[in-house]
Image (cartoon, rainbow, N blue to C red):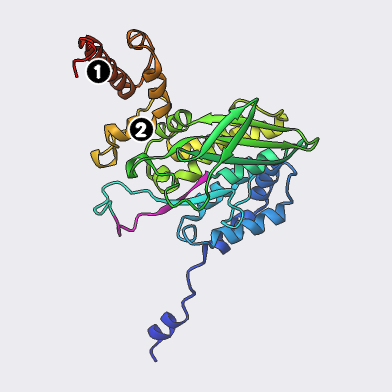
Amino acid sequence: MSTTEATATIQPAPRSNALAVRGILDAPTMTKLLGDALGGYMEIEAFKAQCYMAANEVGARDCSTESLFRCFLACAQMGLIPGSHHKHVAIVPRREHVQNCQRPKSGCGCPLHATVVPQWQGYAHLMRQQPQIRDVKATLVHERDAFEFRDGVPLHEYDPFDPLRVFLHPSAGPCGLRGGYLTVERNDGEVAYHIVPAAKIHKNREAAETQAIWSKWFEEMCRKSIFRDAWAKRIIAVDPQLAQRVGAADAADNAALGNDPAREAPALPEAAKTSKTERIAARLRPAAVVAAALPQERAAIPTTDPDVAEAARIDAGTDAKRSAKPAREPGED
């Protein structure tokens, strides 16, 4: 064996991300940064151990060490724990192409950078940290569900085995989402509810720079929107430190999604749109209210739904034609 071959044989293997992250986190300066960010809610060494495991998970192991450390520092600032088993956050790898990249689609070799995205479980974890909160739960309401909000309490019935009860991103077909609500159980036994309509959830979706994450995890993103809306409207009392953590989670979520409230949703493909008959049928109750009115009063009923308005106009025209026919005299049959 030649000297060159022997040297090549004993070359050390590339250092894994988990070991590289350990080296960064164990540095005195970085340990202090983590301690300041954690603020005492978790032991530093226990948090580091979670970071080591998260750095070795699929998706994160190929990301740059620096971007992973930034993600873990952001987790500490949010008061959330990295790692897929906790589900507080998702570490999403994104390829940042260098200038003049020849193959920007795939296989270009440009570095992967980790991006931290808070999940709805993370927002639920933060809410459960409040001393007066025992548990929280976000529930989505489908168009096939029986739902009524009576005296401040949701009455919700649905078949969990219904194969048609699915929530889809609007680009994939009929969405099925009517809205959702948050159930907040307090330690004193009191239960509070927070209702979020589908329009508000879709407004959050439309604010995203791309629909990639919303398309892949639509149901999960809808649940997160319910928690974010509840936090924004302060349905529970929040101490200042926790408010800072929630603010950091919102900032990380907005940065990861590229949220811009002024952005409009892209036009949906024709295949994803429902027919006019389906849209009218989905709004059967408003149409019935219009149809129940007297013919001369139907035009005065306000409605912002073009399909319902058209149904009322057609129905009113039919009644007008009927009323124009001369009455039959007895014996004309």
Q: Could you say where residue 218 lies in the image, as x and y percent from the top left?
A: 44, 44
Element under disc 1: helix
The three-letter code of the residue at mark 2 reads Ala
Which residue is depicted at the point 37% across and 11% down? 294
Q: Which mark is residue 281?
A: 2
Is residue 60 depicted above or below 244 in this figure? below
Mark 2 closeness class: few <14, some 14–19, many ≥20 residues within 10 Å: some
Quadrant containing the C terminus is: top left
Look at the image and tell me whether residue 278 can be seen: yes
- Against 291, residue 122 (above or below) is below
Q: Residue at x 40, y 23 (%)?
A: 288
**Looking at this view, is 233 or 110 the one in front?**
233
- Quadrant of res 276: top left
Q: Which residue is mark 1?
A: 318
Stretch of the chain drawn in magenta: 106-117
Residue occupying image coordinates x 30% and y 56%? 106
